[in-house]
Amino acid sequence: MAEMNTLHDALVDEIKDLFNAEKQMLKALPKLAKNATNPDLQEALESHLAETQEQVGRLEQIFELLDETARGKHCAGMAGIVEEGNDMLSEEAEDAVKDACIVAAAQRAEHYEIAAYGTCAAWATALGLEEVAQLLETTLEEEKAADEKLSAIAEAGINEAATAGTDSEDEDGEDEEEGEAEAEPAATSSRASASAGRGARSASGSGNGGRSAKSNGRRRAN
Ligand SMILES: [Fe+2]
């Protein structure tokens, strides 16, 4: 592990993590978009893919400003979120239910990024790196907007559509789920430790994202 004696070192480490996280999103977003049925959801995921490309460019600018080589460091947190998303995509589901799950997967990724960018922007400000902070803030606002757009799309119809036809054809589905639940513990614990490792980061930047996640969840529970 790189030496981390100063907050500047820690910032560089987080930027490398984010650089890798964004690259993972460049691969994950097209998959989510391809599997989405709702045209607004598809559009939102595709337009966020274009934004993500710009976000990678902003991180490259930041590396330059920090006099560092633009190089990522494996982001285990995003890898876990992407892995869960891929597991979800491989499940059989009604179109609207799948769309609701795609929103959930994308929002998990957004919230992770919101937390990380929020932290990095605050650190850059504390370190007097105004230009770096500005670039991070710009991306942070994009991530928040993407998250809110996903909530709005879910609440404008996907969640309601997903509540239709729940009981009638569910028996087979439920059997499958039970079977999988038994095989799950190992995967669950590795996921838990990945998120525990990132706990400090989520504590500092996710206020706004948390609110929209709740509102999405609340609708889904109805
Ligand atoms: Fe991003």
Image (cartoon, rainbow, N blue to C red):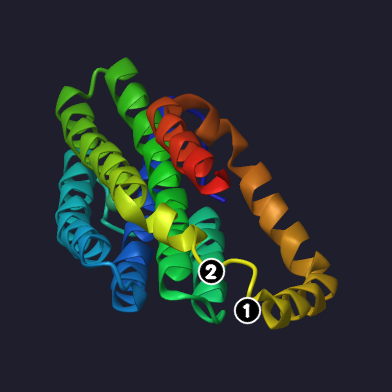
- Residue extending farthest to the front is 168
Q: Residues within 10 Å of mark 1 (few under 14, many from 20)?
A: few
Foreground pick, 88 / 123: 88
The residue at the point 22 percent across, 34 percent down is 141
Q: Is residue 190 above or below residue 171?
A: above
Q: Is residue 197 above or below residue 69?
A: above
The residue at the point 53 percent across, 69 percent down is 165
Q: Which residue is mark 2?
A: 165
Residue 8 visible in the picture = no
Q: Mark 2–mark 1 contact, CB under 8 Å?
A: yes
Q: Is residue 6 above or below residue 104?
A: above
Foreground pick, 152 / 206: 152
Percent x, y for residue 61? 15, 47
Q: Amino acid at mark 1?
A: Glu
Q: Which residue is mark 1?
A: 169
Percent x, y for residue 169? 63, 79
Q: Amino acid at mark 2?
A: Gly
Give the Cα distance between marks 2 and 1: 7 Å
Percent x, y for residue 155? 35, 46
Foreground pick, 170 / 149: 170
Q: Residues within 10 Å of mark 2 (few under 14, many from 20)?
A: few
Residue 60 visible in the picture = yes
The residue at the point 81 percent across, 79 percent down is 179
Image position of 92 (left or right of 22): right
Percent x, y for residue 37? 31, 73
- Quarter of the image with the C terminus in it: top right
Q: Secondary structure at mark 1?
A: loop
The residue at the point 17 percent across, 47 percent down is 58
Image position of 210 (left or right of 134): right
**How many marks can you see?**
2
